[in-house]
Amino acid sequence: MKPDNVLKISGLKVAYGGIKAVKGIDLEVDRGELVTLIGANGAGKTTTLKAITGTLPPCKVEGTIAYLGQALNATQHATKSFKLVEQKLAMVPEGRGVFTRMTIHENLLMGAYTRNDKAAIETDIEKWYTVFPRLKERSTQLAGTLSGGEQQMLAMARALMCHPTLLLLDEPSMGLAPIMVEKIFEVIRDVSKQGITVLLVEQNAKLALQAANRAYVMESGAITMTGNAQDMLHDPRVQAAYLGE
């Protein structure tokens, strides 16, 4: 494993009964990179993220997933998903996963549950309120009453409260109005500039490739292309398959 590897996936296979969702993929993300994994619905992208975080339903998983040089999925010592947050690995899941019966403020505090630096936690909450003013306006509102876009903002801010080394984002633009998508991607780019390593799974291939350093294309559980994200933006195969050009 290279010294600057944050995440290294080797030969990952995931099978549900006879269905092979992921077919032996290799993928790596280096420190400070923003890497995107693009592909059609059902390509195996979300399954890959869930394999990293240990949140898959019962299934057969083969291969290795290493985070900061440590195997996360060694059979006897698989890292419990809640322990990953303590190791500074955070995920914003598809569908956002906010705590609907807690307020915005309480959700943000939950994001910092591994920390005990109270003053710094409050400073961070104020920082995210500045980035997402709508959250500040509604800080005492239950998260379940927010719009989809507001919930996405909250899910991102909550994940960032643990000061992650690696941030996994699963379809952050899904179902959002164009203006909200623009805001979310602005924050993703800013987070990357702050040095946080990001693995982004996204159906909006154009926005994802514009934001990323490198990209992987996944089709039917296999990686079919990988390379510099800007080059892939102009690749006729990617344009034909994912950019509608």
Image (tube, rainbow, N blue to C red):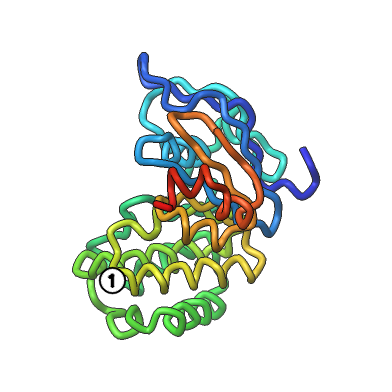
Residue at 51%, 29% (x, y): give it: 222
Q: Is 59 located above or below residue 124 in the figure? A: above
Residue at 56%, 78% (x, y): give it: 120
- Residue 176, horizontal then vertical, whole percent: 30, 64
Tag 1 residue: 103
On the image, which quarter does residue 20 sit in?
A: top left
Residue at 32%, 72% (x, y): give it: 104
- Residue 138, horizontal then vertical, whole percent: 27, 80
Check the image and name the residue furthest to the right.
3
Q: Is 123 located above or below residue 55 in the figure? A: below
Q: Nearer the viewer, residue 76 or 21?
A: 21
Q: Nearer the viewer, residue 240 or 64?
A: 240
Q: Nearer the viewer, residue 28 or 222?
A: 222
Q: Secondary structure at mark 1?
A: loop
Q: Nearer the viewer, residue 130 or 125?
A: 130
Q: Is 168 located above or below residue 101 in the figure? A: above
